[in-house]
Image: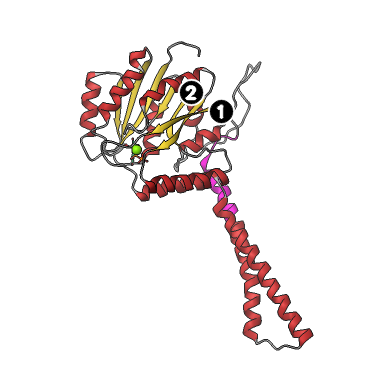
Amino acid sequence: MSNPAPFVSVVIPVYNEEENVALLYEGLKRSLADRGFGWELIFVNDGSTDNSVKVLADLAHKDTSVKYMVLTRNFGQQAALTAGMDYARGNYIVTMDCDLQDPPEIVPAMIEKAKEGYEVVFARRAFRDESFFKRATASLYYKLLEKFSDTEVYGNIGDFRLITRKVLKQLKGMREKSRYLRGMVAWLGFRHAVLDYDRPKRIHGTTGFSLLKMVRLGMSGILNFSLLPIRFGLVIGLLSIFSGTAFLAYITYDTFINNEVYQLYKWLSVITFVFIGFMFILIWILAEYVGQIYNESKNRPIYVVEQEENFDHEPEITYSEG
Ligand code: UDP
Ligand code: MG
């Protein structure tokens, strides 16, 4: 794929971005088409309630490199990105926000990186010109995620990235409903590069991410990529058993050695402590089973092959797919 001008698909979710669509188009055109890249621009309207669709229609009418689809309602950014990627035909697939917070000028640099042989190029927000609250919550969240996640996910990386066709093919095989694309791409494990950029403020329109939507996206990051919440049960259970047992040992000692008399309810409450500990551990074990079921139901591939040499046949696997 050392073609000097690879075909680039840019996938953009659109949720109430009537003022941004044309600006982004101009920016991308300057960065891609004017530099000789073959390109297509795939807009996915995610249930906008403003004039976005009208603006998209006008644009698509003027330039056939612009393609757009309209989802029936608001499915969320991750679903919209998935829809766009399913239709993408490029060698390189770039996903980015519509609000110019992901600057189009970076895209050629991402393509350069891909040409060097990286299959995934993440753009990382080195500096965010955003509210203190958003910066603080984002940084705390990413720290937690980085620390506890089972696959390697980086902090401060959004959905501004480039993947090659090869990666897209694998990603398309991951049809889980609760999606956290940045983590899923990392999970696939292809060779990746990180490109830093300054994230500017949103100029037109308002954020489509209400606090609730952000919490939901954040939760799917944690739930999909770490078992941390599940393991709380184990920790609480152990603490409760240990402290319960310590108390029990203490009052037993006091009773038999010092002839202290403890009322029945005191004995009971200490014993209950120990039992509650066991219950927490049982709940944790149950949760691990549920976690397994959750994992299985995602139907992810078991492994991802990067390269095959001298095999002249497909792998021999008996599928029992319904
Ligand atoms: N978006 C979407 N559906 C939604 C919310 C947002 O498709 O329900 C799109 C939005 O149009 C933009 C991108 O996702 O292209 C990022 O959204 P936004 O800029 O509102 O998020 P923020 O930058 O505030 O995190
Ligand atoms: Mg934004």
**How is this picture coloured?**
secondary structure
User: Is residue 294 rendered magenta in the image?
Assistant: yes
**Magenta span covers which residues?**
287-302
User: Is residue 175 rendered magenta in the image?
Assistant: no
The verdict on label 1 being within 8 Å of ligand 1 is no
Could you tell me how many numbered marks the image carries? 2
Asked if the residue at tag 1 contacts the one at tag 2, i.e. Cβ–Cβ closer than 8 Å, the answer is: yes
Query: What residue is pinned by disc 1?
Result: 190
Left or right position of 238 against 194: right
The crowd level at tag 2 (other Cα within 10 Å; few <14, some 14-19, many 20+) is: many
User: Residue at horizontal 66%, vertical 81%?
Assistant: 267
Mark positioned earlier in the residue sequence (2 or 1): 2
The image shows residue 22, relative to residue 232, as above or below, that is above
Residue 117 seen from this side: yes
Q: Secondary structure at mark 1?
A: loop
Q: Ligand 2 falls in which quarter?
A: top left
Query: What residue is pinned by disc 2?
Result: 164
Instruction: Measuring from the top left, give residue 194's x and y in whole percent.
Output: 51, 29
Q: CA distance from mark 2 to mark 1?
A: 10 Å
Instruction: Measuring from the top left, give residue 162's x and y in whole percent.
Output: 45, 26
Left or right position of 289 against 18: right
Residue type indicated by callout 2 = Thr
Left or right position of 156 against 244: left
| Residue 274 disc label | none
Camera-side residue of 99 and 277: 99
Q: Secondary structure at mark 2?
A: strand
Residue 282 seen from this side: no
Residue type indicated by callout 1 = Phe
User: Residue at horizontal 41%, vertical 23%?
Assistant: 107
